[in-house]
Image: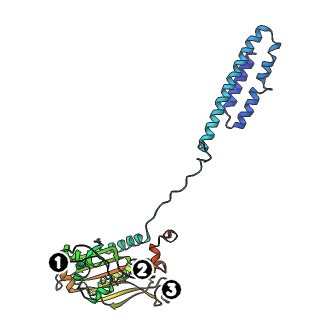
Amino acid sequence: MNQQIDDLRNQAVASLKTIASSDELNSWRVRYLGKKSSLMAVLKGLGELPAEERRAVGGQANQLKKELEALLKEKEEALAAVSNLSTGGTDVDITLPGRPANLGKLHPMTLVLHELGEIFASMGFEIVEGPEVEWDYYNFEALNIPKEHPARDSMQTFWVDAPPGENGWEMLLRTHTSPMQIRVMEKQKPPLRIVVPGRVFRYEATDATHIPMFHQIEGLAIDKGITMADLKGTLYEFSRRFFGTDRRVRFRCDFFPFVEPGVEMAVECGVCKGEGCRLCGQSGWIEILGAGMVHPRVLEAGGIDPDVYSGFAFGMGVERIPLLRYGIDDIRLFYSSDLRFLRQF
Ligand code: FA5
């Protein structure tokens, strides 16, 4: 009998170790502790045993019963702990993969500014930045646009109500990035090649190609013997790299008081491919920049001798660049905060 109870214990303990679910544990309980189990049969049959054997077997069998009950409880708790772990103790299944984090991305204008910077940097231009709140001296006066000059009318200005600066200068939000031409010339002597990306502001009505706050990138190159051919070569190369080799580009004469001669550069419309549409005002072209040879008076204002040096400058409207590349038909979309639009870039 002694041996039989020992065998039963070994069997019960060994099979308990393989159990991994509460169903299996229930079958184990029925098998080793249930009414029809071998252990219960031993306990029920005690009365038929001789008195001295009854005590010894009874003690052993009862001890095994207690031991198996304790093991059962322990296993029940272990299984419950595992199941709590996988559900986090709640209705949430923590074994499921996590929700992806909502990653932000750069605004399309920032991406375009980075790309323009890379293109011009690879052509040897340094990238510099300047103040958005400017003196009228740098924005107009030093650029050969004196007070009362009609060219001031083409750039409706936001004036800043602030005490006047040196020589009675008035404060404004810069209407273009060209003031940096003067600021750079004051500090750096030729040869110099710079581009200036940045925000500019104009008091204007909005439409599909005009907004009151937009970005420009100014370019300036000054050295001995710089000609219009250098300007055109640089801008053609920019267009080839940004828009590809098959996009047509057009130069036409234009007037800006700070260049002589002056041109505007237009690129074939990306929406209608030159056919004419709402975006390009049915012309097939979109003007992206003004440019020209730096006016001798501007070189002088920057402290550079126009008899020795010459230079070219351009000022490109950055928002119009992705319009042309992606065929977007309204510039205002960039600032409408519509994530369905912005996420596409
Ligand atoms: C200028 O701002 C001159 N400073 C450019 C220049 C620089 C000429 C150096 C010569 C030498 P303009 O006002 O044309 O020029 O503006 C330049 C470009 O800015 C335009 O071709 C256009 O692409 C963009 N632009 C002008 N106004 C707006 C506007 N309201 N919204 C969006 N883009 C605009």
Where is 93 relative to 166, above or below? above
Please state the horizontal and vertical placement of residue 50, each as a whole percent of the image.
Answer: 80, 9
Where is 105 relative to 206, above or below? above
Q: CA distance from mark 2 to mark 3?
A: 15 Å
User: Which numbered mark, 2 or 3, is in the foreground of this view?
Assistant: 2
Q: Earlier in the sequence, mark 2 or mark 3?
A: 3
Please state the horizontal and vertical placement of residue 101, each as a whole percent of the image.
Answer: 51, 57
Observer able to see residue 321 = yes
Quadrant of residue 224 within the rendered picture: bottom left
Q: Residues within 10 Å of mark 1 (few under 14, many from 20)?
A: few
Which quarter of the frame holds ligand 1? Answer: bottom left
Taking the spot 28% from the left edge, 79% from the top edge, the residue there is: 178
Observer able to see residue 173 = no
Taking the spot 52% from the left edge, 70% from the top edge, the residue there is: 340
Q: CA distance from mark 1 to mark 3?
A: 50 Å
- Residue 193 lies left or right of residue 115; in this view the side is left
Please state the horizontal and vertical placement of residue 130, each as a whole percent of the image.
Answer: 28, 72
Where is 173 relative to 306, above or below? above
Q: CA distance from mark 1 to mark 2?
A: 37 Å
In this figure, which residue is indicated by the disc labeled 2?
Answer: 320
Amino acid under disc 1: Asn
Amino acid under disc 2: Arg
In this figure, which residue is indicated by the disc labeled 3?
Answer: 272
Considering the numbered disc 1 on the image, is that residue within a helix, a strand or a loop? helix
